[in-house]
Amino acid sequence: MKSVKILKKIATIAAATSLVATMLVGCGSGATSSDNSGKASTASSSGDKLQMWTFVDMHAKFYQKMLEKWNTNNPDKKLDIEFTVLPYDDMHNKLQSALLSGQGAPDICDIEVGKFPNFLKGEPQLETLDDVVGPYKDKIVPSRLALYSKEGKVYGLPTHVGAVVAYYNTELLEKAGIDYKSIVTWDDFQKAGEKYYAATGKNFGTCDTAGSTTLSLMLGQQKSDYVTADAKPAINSPQMVKAVTKLKDMQNAHAIATIPGGQPDTTDAEAAINAGDYAVVIKALWYMNRFTTYMPEQAGKWAIAAPPTWQKGDPRSIGDGGTGTVVTKTAKNKDNVKAFLAYAKLSEDGTKAIWEDLGFDPTNMDVWTNKEITHNKDNQYVKFFKTNPFDVLNDMKSEIQLIKSTEASPNIGAVIATTTLNSIFEDNKDIKQTLDEAQQQVENELK
């Protein structure tokens, strides 16, 4: 009964979480299909017809491919899964309703990281996955499992690390006499931005108002977060004030500027980047896909590097965005379904496909050192960028910090993405006062 009451409460905040979809969604193709489904051709060994929901077309195609491999390699454990792609909010809301009623839930489902805490409230109506994670646990970036866990139990399998990196347009920077390799700290970044603006009159980096990648990065580099250790909102913490103040200083110095669309992962922003209006993008490694898909003419112009940090020796990166794949309590053939998911998302075969087909940095770090995979000259991402993505990943693999996703995250994300950042970077409101107001608003909403 307690979990039912909690799930009813979840439904009341659906509108708030939808406001931050653009802020929190961190992987995939950048677009979803309204209703698209595919079905594996091989019948299930058990005769069960299984359902999987996702909100990203590319994910559905990936799972279909991995299912075909699974069925070929495991003839006694064949699965018959129909993959359905639904709009982001529609899928999450339908899943909540199905779990609340105990009817109509799929057997398997993708849940975006910003929504995941809603499904862990009370007694999760999801299967634990510790048994299939066990053989891979020492190989997986720990912070990515933590995102989809509660009280030491894993309920979702991660899709990628989402390590945040810096993308530098070396062609533009060289013309302005700037060597991106000399940028180590945020002070270095600001000085380079000032120099670039003075030389070109154009923007160096982006000042995001509808997204929080750089802000999250600056918090993680201080080993801080949007919440306290006990998951209470910490929007006005000293670390947050320090991060926002530095961003504002960089904006005032013309080292960063607001971008159309509010953040780089929008159609308007991509057009501006493609036009040469910005020379640096701070975004997760999955943003490579945006370059190859929407900015193909930029091939050979951009280098990937570790992002700046506060001081040399501080952690340099965080994991950004993500999708946890779950098995529901009402699923059929649970043991084989869980084993299939572990194969698709954690095994060497699966993580190789995650890199080659989706362009995501896989959570299984064994792949990171397999040069046949990571330095394959025919790989579209290896060919596109001037530096190798995995060289950057391996250089900072021990420094990737966790930004937690908690029950307060949707509320925090909503106020930051819709009010706080705009107030500070567009309206020039006082930083401390604006953060205090955001803190109070979220505390009131969570009462």
Image: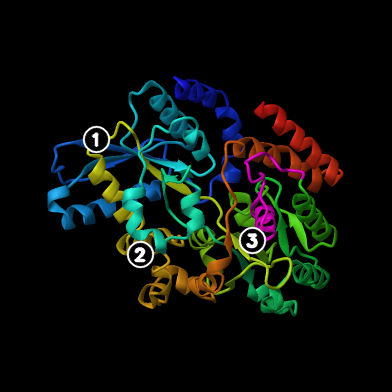
Residue that badge 1 annotates: 332
> Which mark is nearer the camera, 2 or 1?
1
Quarter-wise, where is residue 422 in the image?
Answer: top right
- Which label was assigned to residue 352? 2
Say which amino acid is labelled 2: Lys
Direction from residue 9 to residue 3 in the image, left or right: left
Q: Earlier in the sequence, mark 3 or mark 1?
A: 3
Is residue 168 or residue 4 the one in the foreground?
A: 4
Direction from residue 310 to residue 303 in the image, left or right: left
Q: Which residues are magenta?
A: 212-236
Residue 233 within the magenta-colored segment of the rendering: yes
Q: CA distance from mark 2 to mark 1?
A: 28 Å
**Could you tell me which quadrant the C terminus lies in?**
top right
- Which label was assigned to residue 151? none
Is residue 187 or residue 315 the one in the foreground?
A: 315
Q: How is the image coloured?
A: rainbow
Is residue 220 or residue 211 the one in the foreground?
A: 220
Image marks 2 and 3: residues in contact by CB distance under 8 Å = no
> What SS does tag 3 mark?
strand
Say which amino acid is labelled 1: Lys
Image marks 3 and 1: residues in contact by CB distance under 8 Å = no
Q: Earlier in the sequence, mark 2 or mark 1?
A: 1
The local crowd at label 2, few if under 14, some if 14 to 19, many if 20 or more residues have their Cα within 10 Å, is many
Say which amino acid is labelled 3: Ile
Q: Main secondary structure of the magenta part?
A: loop
Give coordinates of residue 140: x percent, y percent.
43, 60
Residue that badge 3 annotates: 282
